[in-house]
Image (cartoon, rainbow, N blue to C red):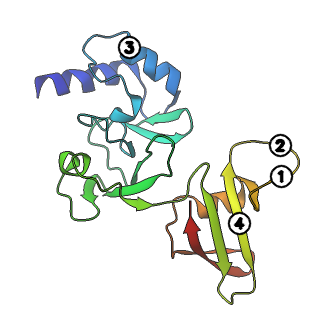
Amino acid sequence: MEKRKEIFDLFKKKFCVNQVYSHSELRLFLENNKIFSVKNVAAYSYNRWNKGMSEIYPLLEWLNRGEYRYLGENYNYSGIVVHHPQGDIPYKIGEWTNGTLTFYNNFKDFKEWRDSIDFGIKVIDLNSKVIFLSEDGKIQQKKILTDTKDAEITFEEGYSLTFFDSPLGKLMRFKTEGEKFEFGNTVYIIKKIN
């Protein structure tokens, strides 16, 4: 408990609430202080975890590749918790509601989820291959969400590339198979996430 308080205090002294910091800046902070036995920036986030972490110290909000917002300890955070296995698609493992964490699939805590073989619920995020269909079945789209900003649309295995920060990318982000979203005047259903 004492170490946890010291970790929270060090973050509070160094960072300003609601300011955005780069992954490299946060990593340097962790590496330059011996109190931090865990050097993985995600271990200090509310919303991005992995099974290799020994415990969590929720202080930051992962925003996107390489960016975190410092929120501080006991923040009234609301949002999903995502697990990003290396080289695989992301999974939702739980959800914060006004600072209270609930795990999916009946896990009672982080350790129980970490020690299980359950990754969570597949979601769409950066590099996901997604197939979605209009409700009436007349339109099918195959997209890969990317952060590549190439001017022309290219195709890979029949999937067109869509920038994950585009209007369509933002609508699909963190959706699960079977979920619906509206784009233009059409309602689509997520059929498959790879």
State the separation of the CA atoms marked 4 and 1.
Answer: 12 Å
Mark linked to residue 154 = 1
Marks 2,4: beta carbons within 8 A = no
Q: Mark 4 Cα within 10 Å, few/some/many (few <14, many 20+)? A: many
Q: CA distance from mark 3 to mark 1?
A: 40 Å
Where is residue 155 drawn, in percent x and y? 80, 55
Pair 1/2: label in front = 1
Residue 6 locus on image (x, y percent): 20, 21
Residue designated by label 2: 150
| Residue 85: quarter of image | top left
Label located before the other in sequence (2 or 3): 3
In the picture, residue 181 is in which quadrant?
Answer: bottom right
Measure the alpha-carbon separation of dots 2 and 4: 18 Å
Residue type for callout 3: Glu
**Which mark identifies residue 31?**
3
Judge the density around disc 1: few (<14), some (14-19), many (≥20) Cα neighbours within 10 Å.
few
